[in-house]
Structures are given as C-alpha cells and as structure tokens.
C-alpha cells in the first residue's frame, strides 16, 4: 500500500469545551487534508481528545462524576464540533482507549528495559494547572506567570526519562532538517531554547496524587505524565507495532498551536521517538493564537467564543472561510464579530453570492436556464481566462506554502475580476440588443461567467467544501474525475441546466445579536 499523507491536530483537553482556538486548528488541518485529497493523495487525518491528567480528575470530582463520564461528555462535544465544521477526519482517538494505552505501556517498558527511564528523588515547584514542574527561570519578575495557576513546592520519588542525553542530537536534527518546524522563525526559537541545558523529563505521577492516568507498566504505584501519554496518540492511532504502521508513519504534518511547540512537540516528542527507534514526523506546523481584545481565547483566560453559535447562524463555510482568510498561519489574529460580518458581507454575500445569483437570474431569463455554448472569445474573455491561468498555479503554490490567507485573497481577486467582466459585458444590455451578433455575445458572456464561477468554486474546495458542492449543483455540474481536470478552463458546462436563482449567503437580519461574550 502506498504511504498515506498523514496529518494530525493536537488532541484537545477533555476538561474544556470547544472554543474558537480548537475550531480554527481543526479547520486549518482540514483545509490541508482536503487539499491533499483533491490532489489525489490517500489521506489519513487524525484528531482526538486528551483525556487523562489532574485537570480532568479535578473537574470530574468537582462535579461529583467519574472522570470517564466527563470524558464521554467532552468527546460528544468535540466530535459534534467536527461534524458541524465539516471536518473530514478519518479517525478520532481518545487516550482512554485500549489501542492507545497499550502502545504507551509498551514504549515505557521498552525505554525502562533499555535504561532510559530511571527513578530519582524530585524536589521542586509544581504547577497543577500546567501539570508540570517549574524552575526558577520560569518566573517572570520574580512571580509565577498567571498561566501556571497555583504553584506548590513538593518532594517525591519519581521516574525520569533521559531527555538530556539526546539534546545535541536534537539540535543537529533541527539544524539539518529545514522543514521540521514551520514557520522557520519558530525553529530558531526552539534552537534558542536548546542553548540552555535541558533536564531529564519527569514522566510519572504518584497514584496517591493522581489516579486518572495510565499506570506505569513497571511500577503501578505511578501513572504516566500526561504529556508522555498524549503525544503517543499520533502513533498509537495508526497501529504502532503492527505492519500497518508503515502505511502511515512518519506523519507529514502535526498541526499544533504555538503554545505547545516548546517543549512538548519540538523537544519531548522527537526525543521520545528517536529513543524508541521510530522515525520523526516530517513537519510540525505551529499556528498562532486567536485573540480577543489582545488576549488569548482560552478557558483559563476566561475569554471564550463559542464557534458553534456562528456556525449555527451562518453555516460551516463562512466560518471556515473567515478563519482561513484572516489568519496568517504562524501569526496571531484578532477575532471580532464585526470583522466576521464584514468579510461575510463583502466577500461572500457580495462578491461570490451575487455573482452566482446574477448568472442564475440572467440565464433563467434569457436562455431558458441553460448554459449556452460559448462563441469565439473576445478580448474581455481572453483577459479573464489569462487571469485564471495565472491564478490557478499561484493559488496552488500558496496552498503548498501554508499561505492560505493569500490563496483566498487571490481567489477572490479572480471572483471580483469576473464581476467586473460581467459589468463590462453587461448581458442585460446585450439581451435587449436586436443586432444578431449581440445574441452570440450574450451566449459567450453567460458561458464565460458560468465557467469562471465553476473554476472559482473548485479552487475554494479545500476551504469551502459545502459551497463547492452546492454551487456545482446550482450549475447543474459535478466534480470532475481529477481536481486537475476540474481546474482546467473548458466548456464542460455547455448545455447544463441551471437551478432557479438562489441566495447562497443571505445577509443577516438587523436582529443579529453579538455572539461573542465580553472579554
Ligand atoms: N491536550 C493538549 C495537546 C496535546 S497534543 C498531543 C492541549 N490541549 S488544548 O485543548 O489546550 O489545546 C488544543 C489545541 O488548541 C492546541 O494546539 C492549542 O494551541 C490550540 N489552541 C488553544 N487556544 C488557542 C487559541 N486561542 N488560538 C488558536 N489555537 C489555540 O494543549
């Protein structure tokens, strides 16, 4: 079997509810997954839920329920988010599943057998919120930053993974694999972090403090540290240890937020894999944060935006379009409902929706709702077609470079050019003109509009899958055998029956209440 293009998101904490940050990451990963599927690749897209750890145990206790019941509830919410957003994940892993736990136990046992895990006394500062030990250097201006919540000093015997002995190897790997971390400036940050000696990683928690975890296979008085457990999902989900594994691994992209790059994904994970003799993922793609009034959208900052409300109101594609159009992957982006409404109104309702509606209207009125055959293209048609011939490769190139916001900008430039073309050709005037040449020009204009719309819808496919499908239905057309063929300018629509005029992106009424909570 050919190796799949394997792409993953981070797995979300089960003690939270889905917010804009989670929704964005799933959309971004889905855009990549759909893009590669459209290019004809076999794709495996994994997302899931991070279910163990202190926070889940505490939240469940606070509610008087079992941790697994809390996780089942969260799994429903996050899977519901995926469905509403049309996320095309092939798998959803939960770290409480046996297929995951058995791989974690096997890796731990293997590392222990080879002397890479040892027991030692640990005395230090511990953050319950971050579930990690801290060092003096983590303080800012002599204080523990707010993100760590309550920090307490504890002493306990624990198990440690020999992380430090792989530090030089990791530095060399990052230096010699330019594509390992995207954007590049983040790779430089990781190398900066690695200039200081790293400590061995404490990978256990005594059961008396934390029982909600995977017991260590060699000492069941302890459970596994949640990061050591969670990271393994990327390989446990694709059958590490079985022959099928080769058909997926190494992952092509791990899509994560910048907050979990250093140290979990850029330090712990590569070293864990290397120590186990497993190849490394090809690329870690670290996106930026969605902010609201300059603050990170998250459960712990109390700033949350329920993406489901926007999706319920407008459907999945406007949300998918907005987050992909606004966020320059790698940078942070400010969210506001006003900005969402402005993009919705100008790009979707005005530029794209109106264009489609106009075609359906005019073809309905003048050509019995059938796409005519184009006559000889004139200068206007040739100019629009040349723009398409430039737009298509340039947009695909931008997709390859993760520059989705610019890819959408360029796609919409083409859509706006098609609107200008329509204005200049003025089919409503041609329809009134009794000169026989005008009838041919009207055919050509309607055929050109229909073709340009079909192509734009196709190019929007990775970001707006529902719009592509619905739009194709309105055009009386369907997907081609390959995306490459679908993106070629042609006359496949000639003779197609068009649907009745439809408003694809209805303007919101005046009663649209703000859907974000005060920051
Ligand atoms: N459970 C860990 C990840 C383990 S991966 C082996 C975790 N969970 S999380 O629920 O806090 O975050 C899940 C993902 O959402 C992370 O990649 C995180 O960066 C992303 N986001 C959370 N808030 C975000 C924003 N405000 N903006 C964009 N993405 C952010 O971390």
Image: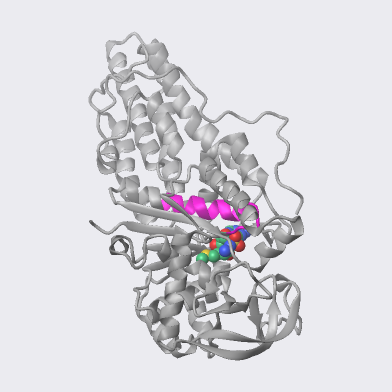
**Residue 356 quadrant:** top left
- The residue segment tinted magenta is 13-32
- The percent coordinates of residue 504 (x first, y second) are 51, 28
Depth check, front residue: 256 or 209 = 209
Q: Is residue 396 visible?
A: no
Q: Is residue 24 magenta?
A: yes
Question: Which sits in the foreground, 136 or 424?
Answer: 136
**Colour scheme:** one colour
Q: Position of residue 517 (x, y in %)?
A: 74, 48
> In what quadrant does ligand 1 lie?
bottom right
Q: Residue at x 76, y 74 (%)?
A: 150
Left or right: 100, with 127 as reference point: left
Q: Residue at x 54, y 47 (%)?
A: 79
Name the one closer to the observer, 277 or 510.
Answer: 277
Residue 406 vs residue 229, the one in the foreground: 229
Q: Is residue 333 above or below residue 217?
A: above
Residue 413 placement: quadrant = top left
What is the magenta segment's predominant secondary structure?
Answer: helix
Q: Name the residue rendered at 30%, 14% in the picture.
A: 439
Q: Is residue 281 magenta?
A: no
Looking at the rendering, in which quadrant would you find the C terminus? bottom right
User: What percent of the width, then of the height, locates residue 302?
Assistant: 74, 58
User: Is any atom of residue 515 visible in this view?
Assistant: yes
Q: Residue at x 40, y 10 (%)?
A: 432
């Amino acid at each position: 079997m050919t190796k799949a293009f394997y792409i993953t998101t981070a797995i979300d904490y089960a003690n939270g509810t889905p917010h804009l940050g989670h929704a964005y990451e799933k959309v971004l990963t889905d855009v990549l997954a759909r893009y590669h599927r459209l290019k004809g690749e076999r794709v495996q897209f994994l997302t899931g839920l991070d279910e163990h750890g202190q926070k889940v145990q505490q939240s469940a206790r606070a509610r008087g329920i079992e941790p697994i019941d809390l996780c089942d509830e969260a799994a429903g919410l996050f899977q519901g988010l995926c469905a509403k957003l049309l996320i095309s994940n092939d798998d959803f892993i939960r770290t409480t599943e046996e297929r995951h736990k058995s791989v974690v136990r096997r890796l731990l046992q293997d590392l222990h057998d080879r002397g890479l895990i040892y027991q030692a006394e640990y005395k230090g500062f511990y953050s319950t919120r971050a579930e990690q030990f801290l060092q003096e250097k983590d303080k800012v201006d002599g204080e523990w930053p707010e993100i760590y919540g309550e920090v307490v000093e504890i002493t306990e015997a624990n198990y440690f993974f020999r992380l430090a002995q792989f530090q030089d190897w990791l530095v060399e790997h990052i230096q010699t694999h330019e594509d390992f971390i995207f954007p590049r400036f983040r790779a430089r940050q990781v190398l900066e972090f690695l200039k200081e000696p790293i400590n061995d990683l404490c990978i256990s928690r005594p059961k008396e403090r934390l029982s909600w975890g995977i017991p260590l296979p060699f000492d069941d008085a302890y459970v596994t540290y949640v990061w050591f457990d969670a990271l393994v999902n990327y390989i446990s989900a694709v059958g590490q240890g079985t022959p099928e594994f080769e058909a997926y691994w190494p992952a092509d992209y791990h899509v994560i937020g910048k907050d979990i790059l250093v140290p979990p994904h850029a330090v712990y994970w590569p070293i864990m894999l290397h120590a186990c003799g497993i190849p490394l993922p090809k690329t870690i793609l670290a996106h930026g944060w969605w902010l609201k009034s300059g603050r990170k959208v998250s459960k712990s900052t109390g700033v949350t935006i329920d993406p489901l409300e926007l999706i319920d109101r407008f459907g999945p594609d406007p949300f998918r379009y907005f987050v992909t159009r606004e966020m320059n992957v790698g940078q942070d982006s400010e969210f506001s409902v006003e900005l969402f409404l402005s993009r919705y109104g100008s790009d979707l309702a005005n530029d794209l929706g109106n264009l489609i509606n106009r075609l359906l209207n005019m073809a309905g009125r003048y050509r019995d709702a059938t796409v005519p055959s184009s006559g000889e293209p004139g200068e206007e048609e040739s100019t629009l077609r040349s723009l398409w011939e430039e737009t298509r490769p340039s947009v695909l190139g931008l997709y390859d470079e993760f520059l989705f916001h610019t890819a959408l900008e360029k796609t919409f430039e083409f859509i706006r050019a098609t609107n200008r073309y329509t204005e200049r050709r003025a089919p409503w005037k041609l329809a009134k003109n009794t000169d026989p040449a005008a009838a041919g020009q009207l055919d050509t204009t309607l055929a050109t509009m229909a073709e340009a719309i079909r192509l734009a819808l196709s190019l929007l496919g990775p970001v707006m899958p529902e719009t592509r499908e619905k739009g194709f239905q309105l055009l009386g057309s369907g997907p081609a055998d390959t995306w490459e063929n679908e993106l070629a300018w042609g006359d496949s629509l000639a003779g197609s029956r068009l649907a009745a005029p439809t408003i694809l992106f209805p303007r919101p009424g005046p009663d649209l209440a703000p859907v974000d909570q005060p920051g």
